[in-house]
Image (spheres, rainbow, N blue to C red):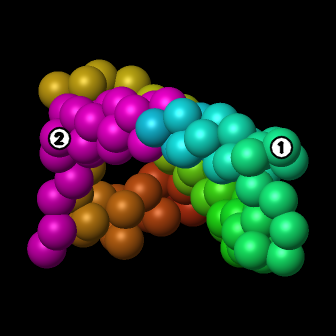
């Protein structure tokens, strides 16, 4: 049977959230750099300049927006998981056994419904 170590899951979620924050900060820098390139109207002239700006606007900008949205949604999902875990087992040093979820919890709920 599987056993969930609540503290380990909290630690992993917190670590992932920190990494996502770092990636988000780095992507913001990349986004600023891309915006700086696409605004170089005076420096990038002619068809070549137009092609370079178009490449960054059409390829990089949509991906950066997608990735930013992905990070936001991933952070939101992790926070929901963390809140759900806190609701299920508020003790950070707790353990949740699969056998408890599969059998004992169901029997306890059934017994509570019959009283």
Q: How many marks?
A: 2
Whether residue 54 can be seen here: no
Which numbered circle lies on residue 56? none
- Residue range corresponding to the magenta coloring: 1-25
In percent of width and height, residue 82 lies at 47, 37
Other-residue count near label 1 (Cα within 10 Å), few / some / many at <14 / 14–19 / ≥20: few
Q: Say which quarter of the image contains residue 109.
A: bottom right
User: Position of 33 compared to 15: left or right?
Assistant: right
Camera-side mark, 2 or 1: 1
Residue to which mark 1 is pinned: 42
Q: Where is the N terminus found, in terms of image quarters?
A: bottom left
Residue to which mark 2 is pinned: 8
Whether residue 42 can be seen here: yes
Is residue 10 a member of the stretch shown in magenta? yes
Q: Looking at the image, which residue is at 26% across and 66% down?
A: 98
Is residue 88 a member of the stretch shown in magenta? no
Q: Say which quarter of the image contains residue 45.
A: bottom right
* Mark 1 secondary-structure assignment: loop
């Amino acid at each position: 049977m599987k056993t969930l170590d609540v503290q380990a899951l909290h630690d992993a979620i917190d670590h992932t959230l920190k990494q996502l924050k770092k990636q988000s900060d780095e992507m913001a820098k990349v986004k600023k750099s891309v915006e700086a390139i696409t605004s170089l109207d005076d420096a990038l002239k002619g068809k070549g300049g137009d092609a370079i700006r178009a490449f960054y606007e059409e390829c990089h900008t949509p991906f950066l927006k997608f990735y930013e949205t992905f990070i936001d949604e991933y952070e939101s999902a992790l926070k929901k998981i963390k809140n759900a875990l806190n609701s299920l087992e508020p003790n950070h040093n707790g353990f949740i056994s699969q056998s408890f979820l599969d059998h004992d919890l169901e029997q306890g709920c059934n017994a509570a419904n019959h009283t």
